[in-house]
Image: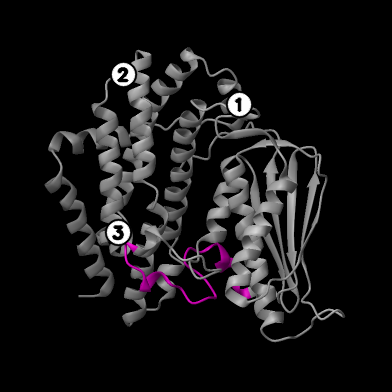
Amino acid sequence: MSLAAALSQSTRTAVKRLADTVPESLVHDIKHFSKRKQKGVSLKYMLDFGQNPMSRQLLLSARFLHDELPTRLAHRVMELEGLPFGLSAKPQVIKVRDWYVESFRELRELPLVESLDQEKNFTHLLGRIKQRHDFVVPMVALAVASLKEDFQSSQHSSTLWLESPDIQGFLDRFYMSRIGIRTLIGQHLALHEPQDTNIGLIDTEVSPLAVAEQAVDDARHICLRQYGAAPEVQLYGDADLRCAYVPEHLHHMLFELVKNSLRAVAERHIETDDDVTDEGDPPPVKIVIAEGNEDITIKVSDEGGGIRRSGMSKIWTYLYTTATSPLLNMSEDDIQNPPAVLAGYGYGLPLCRLYARYFGGDLQVMSMEGYGTDAYLHLSKLGTSEEPLP
């Protein structure tokens, strides 16, 4: 039997397992909800809706989530059941699927939210669901890394799984859906804890420069631990510039971009002592923040040697990395306390682009092999784009 046929057979086994482990009525319910259309929201809608989180708004939010979250969870459960190349049969994927099934079941068993007491119970449930799904990203990454190893240990080319549009498309859809689910849950939870400039998760007075400074400090700290030194980072931007955004999303994206640039410069210059400046230091990473009519654009530039043109398309491929991946040496328990390393997981850039696109922005990377790389992070100022639901 060929590898593809064997993997397909194991996938069918995993699909059968769901029907064997949960009641038939629950499977039917999941299939029914998976056929419903998902309802997207925009950043502007979240802002307008949450400006006055009175009792009525909290009830309306809870009712929307009580109806919408099972739909989104059901879509993902059914997709997890039918993944190609045997990915559905990986124990990590089965565990993630079971998390989604359990969250779906709990939401469906909770009655429609009609009172503030019921809303309180619903909010507690959302907190538990959010915590349950904390480690979905590395768990799925561990499964995909295992699949990669399966192909590499076979006689088949390892590029088959890397370049498969089925695998890449699934991961894009799955992770984008996860961003949406966690944002909606986090928004409702945060409405219960109002802050001065925040509407839920969204800070209406985010300073991109301040967030960039914090991301730089965090990334340089890790670089210092790994290489014993860290290139300087120069920031250029208006300290008075403000926008409405989720600070955690922005920090995550900037941290990943700066981390990549620091690693590239460190490995090209610090470890080799090549091409240092007249003062004996490696060239700095530069961050420029500019405001336009539609977007705020943040450019992260480095002189870390760049990326080969033939490799540019692969930077958006999950688990593609030029560093040694630690994933295959980690257990499921390890991923709940991952080490703070600079590279090797291979899903930083693809996830960053999803975070950017979630609120109507984008991430672009331009590189000059032999010199360095520029990353352009676009944040939409309009906030009218609905979630790009898979």
Q: Position of residue 276 (x, y in %)?
A: 80, 81
User: Quadrant of residue 302 in the image?
Assistant: bottom right
Q: Is residue 58 magenta?
A: no
Disc 2: which residue: 112
**In the drawing, does residue 67 fall left or right of residue 247?**
left
Q: Is residue 327 magenta?
A: yes
Name the residue type under label 2.
Leu
From mark 2 to mark 1, how far is it between C-alphas?
25 Å
> Which secondary structure lies at badge 1?
helix
> Which secondary structure lies at badge 3?
helix
Disc 3: which residue: 92
> Which secondary structure lies at badge 2?
loop
- Residue 352 seen in the current view: yes
Q: Which residues are magenta?
A: 310-333
Q: Position of residue 57 (x, y in %)?
A: 49, 17
From mark 2 to mark 3, how far is it between C-alphas?
32 Å
Name the residue type under label 3.
Gln
Picture layout, residue 270 above or below residue 209: below
Local crowd size for mark 3, using a 10 Å CA cut-off: few (<14), some (14–19), many (≥20): many
Whether pointer 2 and pointer 1 mark residues with C-beta atoms closer than 8 Å, the reply is no
Q: Nearer the viewer, residue 90 or 51?
A: 51
Q: Give the mark, 1 or 3, whose residue is nearer the N terminus.
A: 1
